[in-house]
Amino acid sequence: MSCVNLKEGTRRLALLLGVAGAISGGIVSSVETGSILKIRADFKEFERLANSGVVQEQRKVLLAQTQSSGEVPNWAFDGTPVNRDGIKTIYWRERWSVGLIDTMAGKSLSRGMKLPSAWLYVLFLLYPFLGFLVPWSAVRAIGWVLAGFVQPTN
C-alpha cells in the first residue's frame, strides 16, 4: 500500500462523509425551522385571540359580575365558554388576564409560550455546515494519523 493511495482514499472518504453530513444537517435544519415557525405562528395566534373583542367582552362580563356580587362566578375558574370567532373556551389567570385559549380548531394556546429567538434561525443555518465539517475533519484527522504508520514504497 502506498502513501499516495491512503491520502487519496482518505480525501475521498472525507468528502463523501462530509456531503452526507451536510445533507443530514440540512434535513435537521429544515425540521427544526418548521417547528420554530409553528411555535411562532401559535404565539401570534394567541396574542391575536387574547386581544380580540370577544375576550374583552368576556372580561367585562366577569368584572361586572365580580363587582356586583363580590363573588367570582364558578364558570370563570372552569373556563368561560365562548364558541365564537374561533375561540371555544377562555381560561383566566389572576386579574382576569388570559391564561389559555382553546380554539374551535382544537388547539390549546397558552400565555406561557415565548417567541423563539432570532438566533435560533442562525443556528439552524449552521447545521449543514457543521454536518459537513465534523465528519470531514474527523476522517482527515484519522487519515493523518494512519499515514504516519504507513511507509511509502519506492
Image: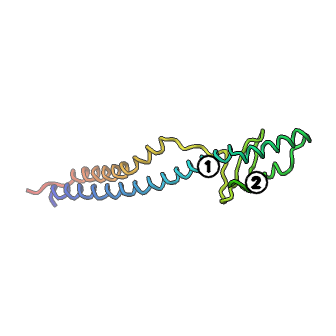
Who comes first in sequence, dot 2 or dot 1?
A: 1
Q: What element carries label 1?
A: helix
Tell me what residue is drawn at x 90 percent, y 40 percent. Answer: 68
Query: To which residue does mark 2 refer?
Result: 82
Query: In front here: 78 or 84?
Result: 84
Indicate the quadrant where residue 86 lies.
Answer: bottom right
Query: In front here: 59 or 26?
Result: 59
Residue 61 sits above or below residue 19 on the image: above
Image location (x, y in percent) of residue 71: 89, 43
Q: Coloring scheme of the render?
A: rainbow
Query: To which residue does mark 1 refer?
Result: 45
Question: Quick one: label 1, few (<14), some, or many (20+) residues within 10 Å?
Answer: some
How many marks the image carries: the answer is 2
- Horizontally, residue 26 falls left or right of residue 52, namely left
Query: In front here: 49 or 148?
Result: 49
Among all residues in the image, which is located at the extreme left? 154
Tell me what residue is drawn at x 50 percent, y 54 percent. Answer: 34
Q: Is mark 2 on a helix, strand or loop?
A: strand
Give, as a three-letter code, the residue at label 2. Val
Tell me what residue is drawn at x 49 percent, y 41 percent. Answer: 118
- Horizontally, residue 83 falls left or right of residue 146, namely right
**Which quadrant is the N terminus positioned in?**
bottom left
Distance CA(mark 2)–CA(mark 1): 17 Å
Q: Are marks 2 and 1 in contact (CB under 8 Å)?
A: no
